[in-house]
Amino acid sequence: FNRLLASGDDNTSKQLYSEAVGNYNNALNLKPGNAVAIAKLAAAEKLLAKSNVDKAKLETEFNRLLAVGDKNVKDQKYPEAIDNFKGALNLKPNDLTAKEKLSAAVQLLAKFNEDKAHAEEQFKRLLASGDENVKVEKYVEALGDYKSALQMKSENEIVIAKIADVQKKLQQ
């Protein structure tokens, strides 16, 4: 009886509440109605219930972070997705799914930034080519360069102004 109570106490201190409940129930089988065993059993059951609620909340938050991260990846919001997956890993540091999703999002962000830098280089090259063609009065070629640049950045006011200037020169 005393060994079972001691095991229950040890399991409770280690947060092994299911095992503690079993220990206290076994002690009560030996001494039914024992007030100490009943009190310890009640306390262990209460801790087990709280632990289960906490685990459920953690699982819910973990799954929410993964789902939001997946949506952010789909929407190409990679930094936000990375934060979501890191948050999920803070809750479950050894979860392979979260680790894989984080790794994939980091790779997608790197590729996105690489593509963005390449597009920016191409845009600048088209502007420079257009400017050079204007200097040597090749207005048709300049217009082609500027229109290609405008396809890359449709709202760019500088490109729109350059196109307007070239079109005026072509009309003259």
Image: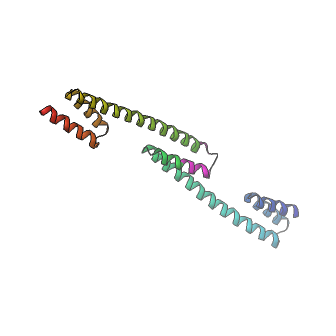
- Horizontal side of residue 133 vs 8, given as left or right: left
Residue shown at 71% from the left, 65% from the top: 45
Residue 13 coordinates in the image, percent (x, y): 77, 61
- Horizontal side of residue 13 vs 160, given as left or right: right
- Horizontal side of residue 14 vs 114, given as left or right: right
Highlighted range, magenta: 85-96
Residue shown at 53% from the left, 49% from the top: 83
Find residue 30 and report its image quarter.
Answer: bottom right
Find residue 29 and report its image quarter.
Answer: bottom right
Q: Residue furthest right?
A: 2
Residue 116 coordinates in the image, percent (x, y): 41, 37
Structure colour scheme: rainbow
- The residue lying toward the viewer, choosing from 148 and 62, is 148
- The residue lying toward the viewer, choosing from 110 and 29, is 110
Q: Is residue 16 above or below residue 154?
A: below
Residue 99 coordinates in the image, percent (x, y): 58, 42
Q: Is residue 39 above or below residue 73?
A: below
- The residue lying toward the viewer, choosing from 96 and 20, is 96
Residue 74 coordinates in the image, percent (x, y): 44, 43
Residue shown at 65% from the left, 59% from the top: 52
- Horizontal side of residue 3 vs 128, given as left or right: right
Please tell me how many numbered marks the rendered image carries: 0
Magenta stretch, overall SS: helix
Residue shown at 19% from the left, 38% from the top: 164
Residue 1 in sight in this render: no
Residue 43 in sight in this render: yes
Quadrant of the frame with the C terminus: top left
Does the segment drawn in magenta span residue 92?
yes
- The residue lying toward the viewer, choosing from 137 and 5, is 137
Q: Is residue 2 above or below residue 68?
A: below
Q: Residue furthest left?
A: 172
